[in-house]
Image (spheres, grey):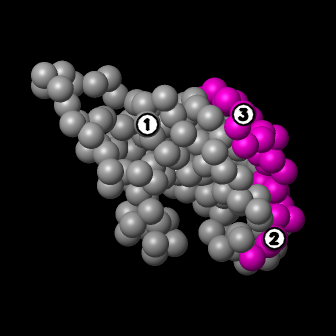
């Protein structure tokens, strides 16, 4: 993407997907996400089972194992919400999805529940990872609001350059 006439675009907010603690992507324990290969974003250690949308847009993907949801925004961001680390191995058991592919969602809208007790009992991490998977195609900078947060509050700000 390029910036016509040097106009700076308004920053975009990524909301917290759950009550909990936001952390930079580099601090998540999954090396692929932590390295930024999957895109820029943030991690959150949830303190609740309720998962909300970090952005407004259209649901483009729900993983067969229910651990991941993709959303495409009007601004052109492809956002992945990845619930837990290595939770694909749980074959959907701890997840209940409340949206469908093709549905339009609003930032802060309920997307899913993740039964953290089941994830933890299986020895997996409950960290939720939110990444812009097309970060490499876009010129953007992400600033993470590290610390305690409530679902729907601004967890990170993306500036499209």
Q: Earlier in the sequence, mark 2 or mark 1?
A: 1
Magenta region: 89-115
In the displayed structure image, the side of residue 13 where residue 137 appears, left or right = left
Q: Quadrant of the N terminus?
A: top left
Of helix, strand and loop, which one carries label 2?
A: loop
Q: Is residue 147 magenta?
A: no
- List the single residue furthest toward the left: 5
Q: Are marks 2 and 1 in contact (CB under 8 Å)?
A: no
User: What is the distance, in whole Å, between disc 3 and disc 1 at their CAs?
Assistant: 16 Å
* Residue depicted at 41% across the width and 57% down the height: 39
Position above or below: 61 against 26: above
Cα distance in 3D space between marks 3 and 2: 23 Å
Q: Tell me the crowding category of disc 3: few under 14, some 14 to 19, or many 20 or more residues within 10 angstroms, Cα based.
A: few
Is residue 21 in view from this perspective?
Answer: yes
Tag 1 or tag 3, which sits nearer the N-term? Answer: 1
Judging by the rendered image, the residue that carries numbered circle 1 is 76
Instruction: Report the residue marked by disc 3.
Output: 103
Q: Is residue 104 magenta?
A: yes
């Amino acid at each position: 993407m390029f910036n016509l006439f040097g106009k700076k675009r308004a920053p975009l907010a990524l909301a917290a997907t759950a009550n909990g603690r936001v952390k930079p992507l580099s601090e998540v324990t999954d090396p692929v996400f932590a390295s930024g290969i999957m895109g820029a974003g943030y991690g959150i250690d949830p303190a609740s089972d309720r998962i909300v949308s970090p952005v407004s847009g259209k649901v483009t993907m729900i993983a067969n194992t229910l651990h991941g949801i993709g959303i495409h925004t009007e601004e052109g961001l492809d956002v992945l919400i990845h619930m837990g680390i290595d939770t694909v191995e749980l074959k959907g058991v701890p997840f209940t999805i409340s949206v469908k592919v093709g549905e339009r969602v609003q930032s802060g809208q309920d997307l899913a529940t993740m039964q953290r007790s089941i994830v933890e009992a299986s020895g997996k991490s409950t960290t939720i990872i939110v990444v812009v998977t097309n970060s490499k195609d876009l010129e953007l900078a992400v600033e993470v609001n590290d610390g305690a947060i409530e679902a729907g509050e601004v967890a990170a700000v993306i500036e499209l350059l």
